[in-house]
Amino acid sequence: MRKADEFTIANKPIASIDLMEKAARAFVQCFLKYEFDTSKSVAIFCGTGNNGGDGLAIAHILLANGYENIKVYIINFNKKQSDDFAINLQRIDESGCKKVILSRASELKNIKADLIIDAILGSGLNKPLEGEFAEVVKAINKLNKRIYAVDVPTGFPTEGIIIKEYNGIRAYKTICFQRPKINFFFPESAAATEKFEVVEIGLDENFIQNQSADFYLVEESDIKSMLKPRKLFTHKGTYGHGLIIAGDTNTMGAALLSSMACLHAGAGLTTACIPQSGLTALNTALPEVMALPRDGMSKLDNLEKYQAIAIGPGFGLSAESKNLLKSLIEGQKPLIIDADALNILAENSDWIDKIPVNSILTPHMKEFDRLFGKHEHWWERIQSAKIQAQKLNVVIVLKNQFTFICLPDGKVLINQTGNPAMAQGGMGDVLTGIIAAFMAQKYSSKDAAILACYLHGKAGDSLAKEFFVATASQVAQQIPKEILKLNKIY
Ligand SMILES: NC(=O)C1=CN([C@@H]2O[C@H](COP(=O)(O)OP(=O)(O)OC[C@H]3O[C@@H](n4cnc5c(N)ncnc54)[C@H](OP(=O)(O)O)[C@@H]3O)[C@@H](O)[C@H]2O)[C@@H](O)CC1
Ligand SMILES: Nc1ncnc2c1ncn2[C@@H]1O[C@H](COP(=O)(O)OP(=O)(O)O)[C@@H](O)[C@H]1O
């Protein structure tokens, strides 16, 4: 983003002070959506770098938008000022805005503000907070007011490890510029900001898009360009056959959910490979799905008739399950490996290197750590996932609020759809079924994983507008509606 900033300044007729002004305007526009009561008092804490410069520009724009009770606090601890900060300081002085200069944290007393804007340090953070900076941040957090952070909460690293003892600003909302920071996608960021929102500030998009990067956001336009229409004269054979090897006596629901998702996401045929004891449930709940009873089987025949094979949801850890997984791994046909199949792999780590290339692994955090070792920090976990996806030549779908899709070429795609209404058992089983459906329809492993994660989350997002909780079966049934919104039938 820094490079984009410099590129924009060098290649567009825009001076850096004007870019700062644009960023501040974009911040205020977003801020006013939520804080339209201009009678509220606002304390704006500004450092002396460009983040602080943004804070000063925000102050005078808020004044121009009807806020009368604005006070800026200049955190003047390191005495170094950026050029654009200095220009905005002069403008603030001319505007007559109330201003306090703090040389020590202990000078921060009697703050009576309804709202706080944090513009002390932004993306320029280059070491953990300590000393006076840590003290002032602690005092601001203690005020217990709604804090809006400019670009980044002070003390929050935009990339790299987020320490457990996070001592930075605890924001209510971060309004960040042009692109979200990678670390916002990790659960540890919840300590720094409850929410984040990205605002456009006019940086050169072509330049940003052409930068080589390890992390990419999945956008709706990507999904639209990937989805294939269903063509005239096609039939069930056109859309492939998905095999879902799942379920056990007490976890048959997982097999039903995966099969239901495979069906609704468009596989031409779906077969559930389940224990005999689940047949009545399957035939009753999902009459469209065929059954392949697997009791006593350590190997499956005729696998060539399936274009996608998913294994794991509710599968159990029995000797029979282990033998079946082993034979499939030896078969070298790409697999979608989830849940208990991942746990079996973790117990038999010498099989991991033999996973068929182009397979898709769909672990949540705990399953991932069981497979590849314990990780203290999400940043490290993602680095491991990147390495393993490359080494094994597989796609690793590391599931969470934001799911990371790690590709064999080292790229990591971040899925932004989905929400806490989806935090309920069976949701991962549905994701596995959707992936299987797209693999059956001859999408590559990469495309199947991307499409499935996006649509799974999108279905949850649509349901969350209507329901407090979205159940896994509701999500499965919502999938064809989501596909239709993005794609023509024929
Ligand atoms: N790029 C964009 O798209 C745009 C960016 N814009 C804005 O610029 C912001 C980035 O500004 P920036 O580069 O001036 O850095 P900033 O965060 O103000 O801090 C710099 C100072 O902090 C210091 N420092 C560092 N760590 C420290 C610590 N732990 N404890 C104490 N001090 C510490 C460091 O001192 P040093 O250690 O180098 O001596 C340096 O002096 C960005 O977040 C956004 O708001 C928009 O205006 C326009 C478009
Ligand atoms: N808060 C959330 N926001 C977005 N997606 C979520 C959230 N909670 C769960 N999910 C999604 O639900 C799925 C849960 O998977 P998993 O834990 O394997 O579920 P289960 O084993 O119960 O089927 C993942 O795809 C995850 O991304």
Image (cartoon, grey):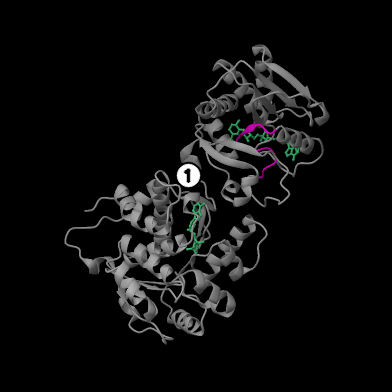
Position of 149 with respect to 432 (left or right) is right
Position of 439 with respect to 158 (left or right) is left
Residue 176, image x, y percentages:
56, 36
User: Observer-nearest residue: 123 or 245?
Assistant: 245
Residue 46, image x, y percentages:
69, 28
- The secondary structure making up most of the magenta span is loop
Residue 213, image x, y percentages:
54, 50
Q: Secondary structure at mark 1?
A: helix
Write down the residue under mark 1.
209
Q: Residue furthest left?
A: 233
Position of 20 with respect to 285 (left or right) is right
Please provide the residue range marked out in magenta: 144-157
* Rendered residue at 16%/62% (across/down): 233
Q: Is residue 307 visible?
A: no
User: Observer-nearest residue: 264 or 73?
Assistant: 264
* Rendered residue at 41%/43% (across/down): 465
